[in-house]
Amino acid sequence: MRIGELSAKAGVSRRALRYYEEQGLLAARREANGYREYAEDAPLVVRQITGLLASGLNSDAIRRFLPCARGVEPELRMCPELRAQLEQRRDELNRQLNQLTVQVGRLTAHLDRSSTA
């Protein structure tokens, strides 16, 4: 299937598909006329990629662990390396969340003080 059809089926932009290809996440065959031709399972692969991106994984991690993905959600076959990667990313996001919570509290305190002055 061509890029426009894949874009419509997978619900992502053509630009995103080209980016996934550049990152080595999605394969396309080039026809003689230069058009990209994607495999029939490409919509599923794109949904897996977007699902993993939405989970906070970066392109490098997705490239390594995409073969572990099953289904649309995707469900991941867990192995020790993948578990360590997911735990590391979760911990990193929790640290960022804690930092944001502190910042929100400080901003709120400034606003509260300024409204009483």
Image (cartoon, rainbow, N blue to C red):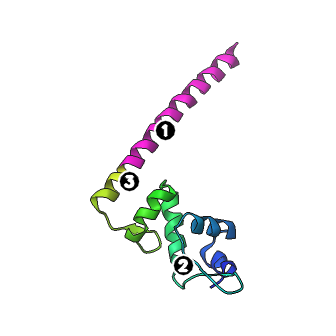
Q: Which residues are magenta?
A: 88-117
Kindly indicate the quadrant of the structure image that contains residue 5: bottom right
Q: Amino acid at mark 1?
A: Gln
Q: Amino acid at mark 3?
A: Leu
| Residue furthest out toward the left | 80
Magenta span: predominant SS is: helix
Mark 1–mark 2 distance (CA, rounded to whole Å): 33 Å
Q: Which callout, 1 or 2, points at the residue further toward the start of the chain?
A: 2
Q: Which residue is mark 3?
A: 86
Going by the image, does 60 lie left or right of 14? left
Q: Which residue is mark 2?
A: 42
Indicate yes or no whether the magenta region holds residue 108: yes
Q: Which residue is mark 1?
A: 96
Indicate yes or no whether the magenta region holds residue 86: no
Q: Amino acid at mark 2?
A: Ala
- In the rendering, which numbered label is found on residue 74? none
Tell me the crowding category of disc 2: few under 14, some 14 to 19, or many 20 or more residues within 10 angstroms, Cα based.
some
In the image shown, does 73 or 19 lie closer to the viewer?
19
Q: Which callout, 3 or 1, points at the residue further toward the start of the chain?
A: 3
State the SS at label 1.
helix
